[in-house]
Image (cartoon, rainbow, N blue to C red):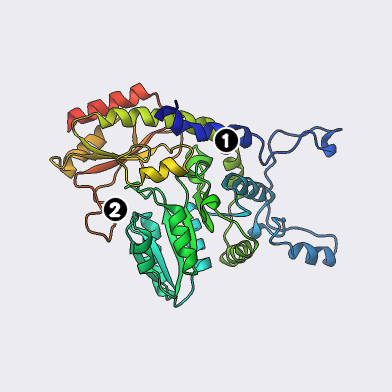
Amino acid sequence: MTTGEERVAAGWERLNALLIRLGRPDPHDDSFRQTGTLVNAPVSRGSTMLFPDLDTMRRVGAERYEHTAIYGAMGSPVQHDLERVIAVIEGGRDTQIVSSGLAACTTTLLTWTSSGGHCLIPDSCYGPTRRFADTMLRRFGVETTYYEPMISADGLRALMRPNTQVVFAESPGSHTFEVQDISMLASVAHDGGARLLLDNTWGFGIFMPFDHGVDVSIQALTKYPGGHSDVILGAITVATEDDWQMLRDAAIQLGQLAGPDECWLTLRGLRTMGVRLARQARTTWRVAQWLKEQPDVAQILYPPFPECPGHEFWERDFTGAGPLFTVVLNASFDRAAMERMVNSLTRFGIGASWGGYESLVLPTTGGISRSMNGALPAGPAFRLAIGLDDEADLIADLREGFRRL
């Protein structure tokens, strides 16, 4: 019988054989039989490509959908290597690398919405995505409606309009970790003539978006693939040729790309992503189980736990779990007490990112925007990102933090 701890790590471990081979030179290729090759692909830096004649320049220029090196602003060879790798991991047709995870969200929304259109976004979405929808999209004439992340099919159908162009999803949701029924969202969106866009950052590698009807999958490669808190990068993956051409054209027009060094570092980070995340997932399970037993804790918002909203969809659809979750304290504590606890922690850095090798803590009370009444926890809350630290050290640090409450 599979234990919870084994289940949260299993999907990451299954990725290892894939990750160590994708996007690398093949030492058995005929071109290397006489000379050998480096283990890793080289970094190519440059802006201008030179061509032997105008006919070649025109021919190569027409290959913008083929991950061909044309001009530096359209991507370098190492960027194209990374794009191929991400597309395989996500199970999609093609990937466009962009400058950040937020750029992946905004570029996607700009690509598939237009003036006079309408989009549906979950109330639990990443804060900067909400800010973009409420400011720039609104200025461009696109209206946004926020929906309850655990909405029913009938509830979503009631919000669809003739001009609804996209349904956006984020599963699990930022800070409150609602796991959405992606297959249902896809069905309703498609019935209404809209695309389903998914921020799949938490589920990257352990949730196959296109198996569940997603049209466009968004990833912040800063998190798990980079893994060392030294890269800012994003990716957008699509399943069809038509969507790929729309995305590629939009990315070129918006000047979206990433530097070759960032792409190379992300490729390097991917080699150990399965090993890192399997270890982090096990530690996360143990730390979350310990926290669950503490009398000062009201709730742990962690998809593998049955009390987390949408746990049944995590159980059905995911092959593992990420190292990020939220701790909700009893309502008898106030925000100031929670912040004293956070400030006292020594093994957790105070920071906004996650998915790297280090453990982080971030207060969420007072920093989350929601439209729905009752969407926020009753007690003060903070988010934990579990790194490669020893679980005993993390638990000891948290135990001392609770003493300071």
Residue nearer the viewer, 76 or 384:
384
Q: From the image, tell me which residue sits under label 2.
A: 368
Nearer the observer, disc 1 or disc 2? 1
Q: Say which residue appears at 51% left-offset and 52% top-offset.
A: 212
Q: Secondary structure at mark 1?
A: helix
Residue at the limit of the structure toward the bottom, as seen here: 116
Q: Is residue 70 left or right of residue 370?
A: right
**Amino acid on which the number 1 mark rests in the picture:** Leu
Q: Is residue 386 left or right of residue 403?
A: right
Residue nearer the viewer, 212 or 253:
212
Q: Is residue 176 left or right of residue 54?
A: left
Q: Say which residue appears at 50% left-offset and 69% top-offset.
A: 193
Query: Could you tell me how far apart the alpha carbons at marks 1 and 2 are, in whole angstroms?
Result: 33 Å
Q: On screen, 180 above or below 107? A: above
Image location of residue 206, percent across then percent down: 50, 41
Image location of residue 341, percent across then percent down: 22, 35
Q: 10 Å neighbourhood of mark 2: few (<14), some, or many (≥20)?
A: some
Asked if residue 111 can be seen in this view, the reply is yes
Mark 1 or 2, nearer chain start: 1
Residue nearer the viewer, 333 or 306:
306
Q: On screen, 361 above or below 201? A: above
Image location of residue 357, percent across then percent down: 46, 33
Q: Quadrant of the C terminus?
A: top left
Q: Quadrant of the N terminus?
A: top left
Q: Is residue 80 left or right of residue 174?
A: right
Q: 10 Å neighbourhood of mark 1: few (<14), some, or many (≥20)?
A: many
Q: From the image, tell me which residue sits under label 1.
A: 15
Q: On screen, 88 above or below 257? A: above
